[in-house]
Image (cartoon, helix red, strand yellow):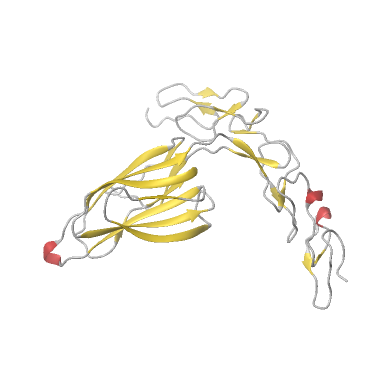
Amino acid sequence: LSRCVCPEGYSGDAGESCVACEAGTFKSFEGPGACLSCPGDGVSAEEGRSCACGAGHFFEDNVPMLSCSGESSESCPCTPSVGSNDGTLSFEADPSDWDWQSCASIIISGVAPRVTVTSLQVQNVQLYAYLDECDDVDCSSYQSVGSTSISSAGWEYQSSTRHLRVRFEWTTYVDSSAFGFLGNVVATWSTTSKAPECSPCEAGDYKNTTDAAGCTACPSNAVSAEGSTGLSSCVCPKGFSGDAGAEESCVACDVGTFKPLEGPGACL
């Protein structure tokens, strides 16, 4: 029974009946949890799995999530969770191998994600945390922060992006006759709560419908203002010919030609 979970658009905990989200509410993830109120006019979409947002805006559920990247092991587990603003990570490590050892990476998604080492037992071993600030939940686009050594409880890091990837690694630094132990490492993770919202399309995108769809990119090399509500908002910048509003790509002016104004037109 514990493997039975409520799908997206349905509230309820394990062992309980799953109830469809009421009009004006949503639940965007599978598992236990309540339906949340939609922002703005409160219009549900996709059978309670999302919310509708007006032209020029897309829906952000802001639901926090912990996901795993890489293989998890018995001594170093990673249990994904959705809908909770915080949680605890713990593992035991055996430093009887000179090679570097590591845990599966965890990805903390939410507003201002943070990881803190709250308990640490270490002897003749050095523990490190490798950190990446990511642009998406899969960390397919990220900025490496680098690694930092952790020698005592109380170490923490907070990301400036919505997604933080953390990987713990350790190595021994004594001769083979005196291996020490790393013992237990307990870390907590947390995110700041934020209500679901309809956010404006980014510059270079547009959306001309009221629904749960995302924003659409302007034609190649075209620009648009934040929150643009239609293709007509996309224009070719200075130095580029074409008519983006007619779904044409913007093409850079050839050597010896120019275009001094933003908008449709040819290079001179």
Q: Count how many numbered circles sit on residues in the image.
A: 0
Task: Tell me if residue 78 comes above or below residue 83 in the rendering.
Answer: below
Image position, residue 213 (x, y; %): 67, 41
Give the residue at x 80% y 74%.
254
Is residue 133 rendered to the left or right of residue 54?
Answer: left
Q: State the residue in front, 160 or 236.
A: 160
Q: Quadrant of the N terminus?
A: top left
Examine the rendered structure and indicate whether residue 154 appears above or below residue 53. Answer: below
How far across and down, in percent of the image, does residue 251 sit?
78, 66
The percent coordinates of residue 119 (x first, y second) are 26, 45
Which residue appears farthest toward the left when viewing the image? 177
Residue 221 to residue 5: above or below: below
Q: Is residue 70 visible?
A: no
Q: Which image quadrant is residue 214 in?
A: top right
Can residue 209 be seen here? The reply is yes
In which quadrant of the rendered image does the C terminus lie?
bottom right
Position of residue 196 in the picture relative to residue 81 (left or right): right
Residue 212 percent coordinates (x, y): 66, 37
Instruction: Please report the residue visible at 66 percent of the width from the left and 28 percent of the height from the top.
Output: 43
Q: Residue at x 26, y 65 (%)?
A: 99
In this rendered view, identify the residue nearer to me: 136 or 194: 194
Query: Please, is residue 162 above or below residue 40 in the view?
Result: below
Query: What's the residue at 58%, 33% (across, down)?
Result: 49
149 left or right, relative to 244: left
The residue lying toward the viewer, choosing from 1 and 106, is 106
